[in-house]
Image: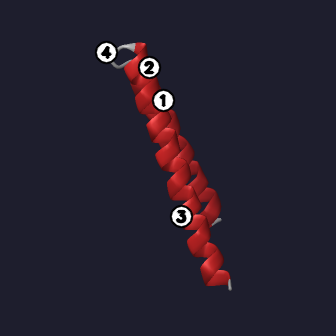
Amino acid sequence: MKAHSFFALMTGLAVGAVVGMLFAPESGENSRAKLKKAVQDCLDELNVEEAEEDEKAE
């Protein structure tokens, strides 16, 4: 259940970030660059947390 809640939270944050960027008063190029960085940061964070969980399981 905890993993499901975390996934739901991360999904909500990602959707909120995308919607916020789409309505932001910046150029499309800047918005896409920020979106790409935000997605990469989220993926990096998930990879770190997954690695920590794997270490705990061992």
Q: Which mark is residue 18?
A: 1
User: Mark 4 is on which residue type?
Assistant: Pro
User: Mark 1 is on which residue type?
Assistant: Val
Give the alpha-carbon distance from disc 1 to disc 4, as whole Å: 13 Å
**At 61% from the left edge and 74% from the top edge, which residue is drawn?**
53
Q: Is residue 22 left or right of residue 8?
A: left
Which numbered disc, 1 or 3, marks the residue that appears first in the sequence? Answer: 1
Which corner quadrant of the image does residue 46 belong to? bottom right
Look at the numbered disc 3 and give the secondary structure of its residue: helix
Q: Which mark is residue 25?
A: 4
Residues at marks 1 and 2 touching, judged by CB atoms closer than 8 Å: yes
Look at the numbered disc 1 and give the secondary structure of its residue: helix
Residue 20: horizontal and vertical position, in percent? 40, 27
Q: Which mark is residue 54?
A: none
**At 56% from the left edge and 73% from the top edge, which residue is drawn?**
52
The quarter in which the N terminus is drawn is bottom right
Residue 41: horizontal and vertical position, in percent? 47, 47
Residues at marks 3 and 4 touching, judged by CB atoms closer than 8 Å: no
Q: Is residue 10 left or right of residue 50?
A: left
Which callout, 1 or 3, points to the residue nearer the camera? 3
**At 61% from the left edge and 82% from the top edge, which residue is drawn?**
56
Q: Residues within 10 Å of mark 3 (few under 14, many from 20)?
A: few
Residue 47: horizontal and vertical position, in percent? 58, 60
Q: Which mark is residue 48?
A: 3
Q: Residues within 10 Å of mark 4 (few under 14, many from 20)?
A: few
Which numbered disc, 3 or 4, marks the residue that appears first in the sequence? Answer: 4
Residue placed most toward the observer, 23 or 8: 23
